[in-house]
Amino acid sequence: MRRVFKGAVSGRHLQVGLACAALLVSAVMPAAAQTIELPDGAIDLRNLPSQFGQRGNTPQNASSQLDRSRAGAGGVDNYLNMPSGQTQFDARDPMDPAFAENAEMGRPSPLERQYSQRAGKRLEQFGYDLRNERRLTSTALLNGAVPDDYVLGIGDELVVTLRGQVNSTTSVRVDREGRIVLPNMVPVAAAGRRFGEFREDLTAQAQSAFIQTNVFISVGSVRSIGVLVTGEVRAPGRYTLTSFSSLVEALSQADGIQKSGSLRALKILRGNTTIAVDLYDVLLGSRTLNDLRLQDGDQIVVPAIGETVAVQGDVVRPGIYELKSNEAGLSAVLALAGGPQRARGNRIDVLRLDKSGRNQVIRNAAGGAKVLAGDIVLVELPRDAFALEGAAEMPGSRGLAQAKTLRDVLNEPYVLSANPYLPLAVIDTEDPATRQRRYVPVDLQRVMDGSMNVSLRERDRVIVLSQADVRYLGSADVQAVLRGEQPPSVKLAVDRTITGEKLAMAGAAPLPSNEITSRATGQRSQSRRANEAASGTGFDAYEAYQQDRDRQQVPPRDDFQDGRESDGTSRPRRLIGTYQDPTNSAGVRLVESDVECGGLQTLASLASEGLQQRYSVAMRTGSRQLSDTSVIDIRACPRIFHRHPDLLPFLLEYAISIEGEVRFPGVYPVVPGAKADTVLKAVGGVTLDADSDAVEMTNVQGERTSDMSLRQLNQATLNPGDVIRVAARVAKREVGVVKVAGEVLRPGRYDIKRGERLSDLLRRVDGLTPEAFPYGAVFTRERVRDAEEAGFRRAALELEQSIPSVMAGASGQEAEQARQALPFLQSLVNSLKSARAVGRVVVEVDPTVLAARPELDFVLEPGDVLTIPKRPSHVTVSGEVLNAGSVMFRSGKSARDYIKIAGGITSAAEESDAFVIYPNGESEPLSLGRFSDGSVPIPPGSTIVIPRDPQPFNFLTMTRTVVGLLSDLALSAASLAVISRN
């Protein structure tokens, strides 16, 4: 089996490496394996000295193509900040023709560095990325028909086909005399003639020599020509091309024009004639390649690059362009760059070098202005503009000439989108003296009413909030950050991450992440677009970034600008959560979540400084802990707070709290002096249950005004820090219903009023049916059920905690008893944990009794359930009897009689602890013993319970508690049986 080692190493490293390889492989490897394949050929290690000697003739200072490419592999994105010596290894094959070219193209030229440093933005020379197939051979096949204007020459092969009197196909070449000779025809001159002209001449001569003969002519192969390429190309020299080759193909053979070479002053020396060529005509489409056909003996001269200018900003092709002279018209220069992207409304500035080589700015250059060599033309939006964003129909930049004040903006039709928040908007403005940006709150409602107006300045940003944006202030995430806690959305994301890691470590299938992956991919791709858009500086770079961002639904991940001037730094926007990790020395582990919100991050940094007092009013709403409710208000972070991270804390400073009977209670920011009716409209107004004469308002100084009417509130003004509470009307009807089932004339669900009693409910259901058994009624209440379940859980916990200590302290016979009782106790603990409490209350539901004894007639509560069964005809015997079950009721029978019918007690029964559960839920001990037969009357529907002998549990100090728990479980089971039957 032949082993092949492939490598890409420079010539100066071959000597030591190959010598060592020869010593090793000659002794241990078979002859077939002693071969190393390099990109430029194979080396036989058995003939290493002779082969390496041939390679060693190369001068020591001759660097390989790989070395040259390594020396210039500096990244394009880093050339403004990275020293030229920092390079990155390229693992491609160094003999690949595209290798050196790509490396050269990736390295900025000195001219590009100079222009980029002056402009503060990356600029590239236009036209030097032209690509074409390289290393063409003279035998390359031609595709397609030969054009009629092709000039024939000596060496061209022609295929002539005659059909008619003579049928033949002949391949002939143009001889040194410039002719072709066909059988039975006179020679025809071909060299120097156009192919179309020659075809017509040959057809005429053939038709005169032969009768009714058609002539078909094609070019079989073309001749080779030699062309000399000199000047500023990467590989000057003489190249063999085909007669079809153009100037561009010759330049490609020479590895293209260097960035120090001219594209507009090329020369083709043809004999005593000089042909000037401007490659911009080819690149811009005003000239075809067919106009640049070469001839044998041509010399192509590429001179050094001439004078240049640069065009930057909002044009089709920003870049560096070469001029034909020292100056050009502004319109001509813009035409080279494809023209401005906007048809009108462009601000054109020119950066021009002064005598000391420093930039001087020429503002608002006119269309007829002259552009000198070395100028940089900047095409941007006019500075007299502001931006509208947020809840607007058409966000974006607007000219100050059209709207100089905020009222002018709002007077435009359909300027705001649906559901804007009018009590407060924000203007992100710039102090003209300090150039510091700050937020200014404005009341849009007062601006629209005419009682307030704000003048706009250039570079202002008018941020209109939506109602959804404002309601985010009362979300669970914001409230948790204000309390210094981890936001629920971050906790959820961290738990999902940790769960995925544990599943992966366990070898299980990971959680579905297609949506997360696609979203992350979209974030990464958008982050790249954001970086490109943000590569400019100042207001216009942010404008380009925001337009790109608003077209996407997923916010960018990194390098986010917050509406102020970029300082060149980037801040992560993914929130970091904590996870309790015992394996970590710190006890916690930091986990990066997929939650992105710049506003939450800024708010968290302020909360960590202990500044919660600043937001005390904002913390009033939504301050419950997660364990207090099963519903958590987790909202997605609005994009406006991600775009402006400082906006969320700013709004919370201006917040008021509105609580009580309004449509959407919560935290709402207001401008000082805001009208209360405007704020009430923003919160959706009051509910139908609101008491219009019970409004309470507390200001920031703690002064409280009570018993206000809604009319008085609407005439009041609000300030940040105020608390408004709209009380509910005193309800005469309970919230909720009661349920009546079983043997009543009109069972169903009934609403109740405050103070309504059981007798009132029985009258509403029209009384009991003749088959009703009121003594066995089951009445349940939610509060009682909750208390019973809490008791079960508490008893289970106490019993579970006592088992280990009892097991450890038992010895001898008690230890054996404990071991035998352990399965039963564990089963009892599990039963208590999962037991469903009934919440039964012993009541009297007989209407006649309630009328005679009013103290038994109690007040109903929402959620109460009354079940009245039919008159039973059986008695149930359960517990430690041989045949537990129900037996028919027999008048006069005692408890012992029913136990005998059930087969009698078992050996594990404790007969003295037997008890009876009456149909109404009461219980009574039976006192069954040697001298008692349990003469307690047993009515129909009763349940006789024979408990287990506690002897095996004598080692427990809470034996009686265990017996009591068993009794409670039996009572719950009996009640559930009655309810399920009805």
Image: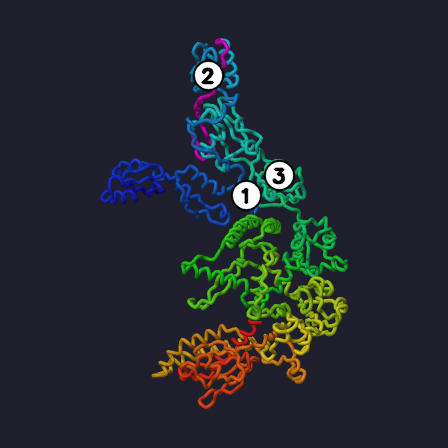
Compared to residue 446, the image places residue 83 above or below, namely above
Give left or right: position of 831 versus 867.
left
Q: Position of residue 240 (x, y in %)?
A: 42, 27
Compared to residue 72, the image places residue 286 above or below, namely above
The earlier-in-sequence mark between 2 and 1 is 1
Q: Which residue lies under the disc numbered 3?
A: 339
Question: Of tags 2 and 3, which is closer to the observer?
Answer: 2
The earlier-in-sequence mark between 2 and 3 is 2
**Mark 2, residues whose alpha carbon is within 10 Å: few (<14), some, or many (≥20)?**
some
Pointers 2 and 1 in contact (C-beta within 8 Å):
no
Q: Nearest the camera: 113 or 210?
A: 210
Name the residue: 62% across, 62% down: 472
| Range shown magenta | 209-238
Q: Position of residue 951 (x, y in %)?
A: 40, 84
Q: CA distance from mark 2 to mark 3?
A: 53 Å
**Mark 3, residues whose alpha carbon is within 10 Å: few (<14), some, or many (≥20)?**
some
Q: Which residue lies under the disc numbered 2?
A: 161
Amino acid under label 1?
A: Leu
Q: CA distance from mark 2 to mark 1?
A: 57 Å
The earlier-in-sequence mark between 3 and 1 is 1
Amino acid under label 2?
A: Thr
Q: Is residue 213 covered in magenta?
A: yes
Give left or right: position of 590 versus 567.
left
Q: Which residue lies under the disc numbered 1?
A: 123
Amino acid under label 3?
A: Gly
Q: Quadrant of residue 306?
A: top right
Q: Is residue 339 covered in magenta?
A: no
Compared to residue 878, the image places residue 723 above or below, namely above
Query: Considering the numbered disc 1 on the image, is that residue within a helix, a strand or a loop?
Result: loop
Q: Position of residue 320 (x, y in %)?
A: 55, 40
